Amino acid sequence: MNKTIITTADAPGPIGPYSQAVLSGDTLYISGQVCIDPKSGELKKKDIREETGQVMKNLEAILKAAGMNFNHVVKTTIFITDMNQFSTINEVYGKYFEANPPARETVQVAALPRFVNVEISMIAVK
């Protein structure tokens, strides 16, 4: 199996024993990203709009490090702590997938790392 670890300083480093992303063949598996600003290390969570925007910026940086963009994304998983915030998260997320959006599920969970409100993971294919 061909497995390449993808890392970039333009997205937050892992806060546990995992990689930002793994490229296997033409498929990129991106670990769940939260709203950590990679430059300051601080959480960007003034509101759910800012929080989701930072998550998407982090995902975009990892895609770029692998030579991809949002057009390559085939599947996403969104974890949220409050389903009442779904429409706002969806609005921000949707701006990155205006045409041909990927498959997706959204799941409400009890808590997320660093007590953030949203975490998104992705699978992309070249």
Image (cartoon, helix red, strand yellow):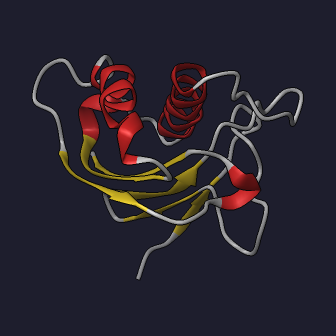
Q: Is residue 19 above or below residue 90?
A: below
Q: Depth check: 78 or 85 in front?
A: 85
62 sits to left or right of 84: right
Residue displayed at 27% across by 24% down: 94
Q: Which quarter of the rendered picture does the C terminus lie within?
A: top left
The residue at the far left in this view is 100
- Badge count: 0
Residue displayed at 89% across by 28% down: 40
Residue 43 coordinates in the image, percent (x, y): 78, 35
40 sits to left or right of 55: right
Q: Depth check: 22 or 90 in front?
A: 90
114 sits to left or right of 67: right
Q: Is residue 28 above or below residue 66?
A: below
Q: Is residue 100 above or below residue 28?
A: above
Residue 92 coordinates in the image, percent (x, y): 38, 21
Residue displayed at 36% across by 46% down: 83
The residue at the far bottom in this view is 1
Residue 75 coordinates in the image, percent (x, y): 25, 52
Residue displayed at 78% across by 33% down: 38
Residue 70 coordinates in the image, percent (x, y): 33, 31
Q: Depth check: 39 or 113 in front?
A: 113
Q: Quadrant of residue 37?
A: top right
